[in-house]
Image: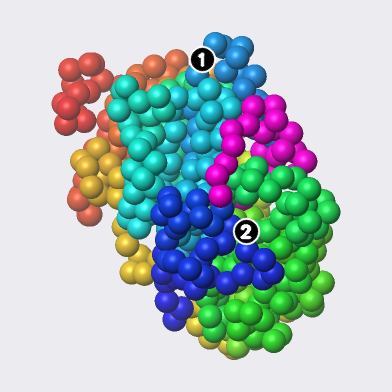
Amino acid sequence: MNEALPDVPEVRVVGLPQLTSGFDLVDRLDLPMHLKVHGPLEPMGGEQLAQLAERINLKGRGGAGFPFHKKLRSVAEAAIKRGVRPVVVVNGSEDEPACRKDTVLINRAPHLILDGALLCAEALGARTLVVGVTRESTQRSMEAALAERGLNNGRRSALRARVQRNPVRMVTGAAASLIRSIDGGPAIPPGRKVSASQNGVGGAPTLLSNAETFAQLAIAARIGPERYGNTGLYDEPGTVMLTVSGAVARPMVIEVPTGVPLRYVLQLAGAPPVPQGVLTGGYHGKWIDAATVNEAIVSRNSLDAVGGALGAGAILPITQDTCPLGESLRVAQWLAEESAGQCGPCYLGLPAAARGLEDILNGGGPAALEALKQVAKNVKRRGACSHPDGSAMFIESTIKAFTDDLAAHVLGNGCGRPVEGVLPLFEGGRAPTGIPGGGEAEENGPSRQKIYVDWTLCRGHGLCADILPEVFQLGADGFPTVAQAQVPRYAEAKALRAVRRCPALALRLEESGAPGAPSRNLPVLSQGRGRRALGR
């Protein structure tokens, strides 16, 4: 079985280092060493900074790839229009088992990230800076970096800066989850899609981007767009940080210029000469086959063109000796377990997709394949965050990339190869903490209730989605997209309110007791009885 990656694996560089400058000298660049390696950094005006980001075609390195200059200008315009101070947030949450590049940067070069964030804060006139992390090592390193710069969260500070530590969980890395946690809520998406640039932390326009993105901006601000453009491709200049794991002899984080052949990166990590497939972009990414690997180069456009994805920079080859569908099933099951339990496409759809893939492996035949395709289709673009979309994309890519193995399982007796567990997952299936299902606080414990929609009564008023967005999303027809769902512990009061206020009386709650115990219905009750039924 593949062991979990350490927080800071081996780090390599192809060509001249930029983000990893100084890594050959010390394990961690404190502020004096950082300044010796990179030199001082002059402040820049907002439009000057936006033009720099546009000239180097800087896009978010967290997975979505949104142009940074557009985000910067959007925040500035919103702040000016509303007459409020914006907020700057560094997203250093890296909660995917196959990703470590941001963790490496925070642990070893935290001041490079802060350089970019502070440039933006000064240019925008921000008075609040928050760095979101999920690991103890990244929290320690970033808190030390803030202290080295004399930054703190004191009320009299010109810039209030702090670290926000969240649980290690796939959904906590979403921008909306991080913002919600900074505002004091649980580290899960809010149930409706909002623009951080317009309405982020505390309702203020918020510039939120990935840790590597800010570090890249700091490099470009020092050396200028011309020098920055001398590295890598013309249309995607600079370097990228990749995490290479899976079936490799040496799992590593590697900084490479864009344009480097993907097969060369795999060779450096000791991947098989002819891998059966390579997962690009991580567990919200896409598979490419062995023939395609030889065509691909490290760039967002190139990987997109061959059916892959740069995503968050995770690259995972597998050997010819393992069952690719079985390896993908392990990931699909993990993705299903990472649900925040807020919406049907995630809470119900992802487990159904994992079961569908398992049915195929167990000889379910063509009917199982068609059912899986339908589930994946139904999940997309209907969730409260991007987790269902990314997970569905991974499953669809698995079906598309391994057609021979798929045929062997669907039409025959299987491929005959074992599942070796070469794709890294967190060890021991450890329970997340601090969000529903985590088991730390009472309000964040396992869900005790389910809410049901009676379709014979529902008239599509949509009030349930307004009151309980953690559970209900409305489809194009204006009706809820789920018939039943678990209610997160923290949302139980809102669930009861939704039941009471439904004009068609189409909702009901059921409270589950111990295993084997009968369920207890919680219908529309008077205020006093309702509180007793919920244990309030």
Nearer to me, 520 or 211 = 211
Magenta stretch encompasses residue 443: no
Disc 1 target residue? 84
Q: Amino acid at mark 2?
A: Gln
Identified by mark 1, the residue type is Val
Q: Is residue 419 left or right of residue 81?
A: left
Q: Is residue 139 left or right of residue 257?
A: left
Q: Quadrant of residue 281?
A: bottom right
Does residue 155 appear in this view? yes
Q: Which residue is mark 2?
A: 18
Q: Provide the secondary structure element on which disc 2 rests.
A: loop
Task: Tell me the magenta residue range.
Answer: 39-68
Vertical placement of residue 223 versus 271, above or below: above
Q: Nearer the viewer, residue 134 or 284?
A: 134
Discs 2, 1 touching: Cβ within 8 Å: no
One can see residue 167 in this view? no
Neighbourhood count class around disc 2 (C-alpha, 10 Å): few under 14, some 14–19, many 20 upward:
many
Question: x, y (%) of residue 493?
Answer: 29, 26
Q: Quadrant of residue 306?
A: bottom right
Q: Residues within 10 Å of mark 1 (few under 14, many from 20)?
A: some
Give coordinates of residue 131: x percent, y percent. Answer: 43, 41
